[in-house]
Image: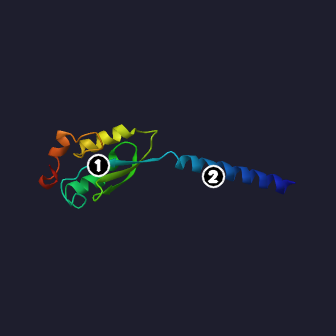
Amino acid sequence: MKNSILKSIFFLTLLFFTSNTASAQKTNQKAVIKTFLHCDHCKECETCGLKFKTEMLKIKGVKMYELDDKAMTFTIYYNPKKTTLQAIKEGIAKLGYDADEVKATAEGIASLDGCCKA
């Protein structure tokens, strides 16, 4: 009897932690944002490449990103409880890059290397 109660408690505890982990994983969302790169080496550029590595993850709620320089898209993984897709696009625009319908800011463009500007 005691053994059966312990098994039940163990099973319920395991079930509780598994369901919490699964629900936590579902909170992140994925979005593909179209951009425009003016050069063919932005990811490797000393200024722009470093900016991608450091500043993209500083945008609130962004968990991970991928830049596809051939397709000119950002794939963004973010937590919608901490930010909105519009706020992410505005953050990308402040870095000097278009993000779908949100155009790069003048300050962001000014911070880019000469080869990466229009």
For the residue labelled by badge 2, is the local secondary structure a helix, a strand or a loop?
Answer: helix
| Left or right: where 21 falls relative to 10 | left
Q: Residue at x 20, y 43 (%)?
A: 108
Residue type highlighted by circle 1: Glu
Q: Residue at x 68, y 51 (%)?
A: 15
Q: Quadrant of residue 84?
A: top left
x and y percentages locating residue 6 in the rendered image: 78, 54
| Left or right: where 17 falls relative to 61 | right
x and y percentages locating residue 35 in the rendered image: 27, 49
Foreground residue among 66 and 18? 66
Residue for badge 1: 55
| Left or right: where 17 falls relative to 70 | right
Whichever of labels 1 and 2 marks the residue nearer the N terminus, that label is 2
Are the residues at dot 1 and dot 2 in contact (C-beta closer than 8 Å)?
no
x and y percentages locating residue 26 in the rendered image: 53, 47
Residue 113, numbered label: none
Residue for badge 2: 18
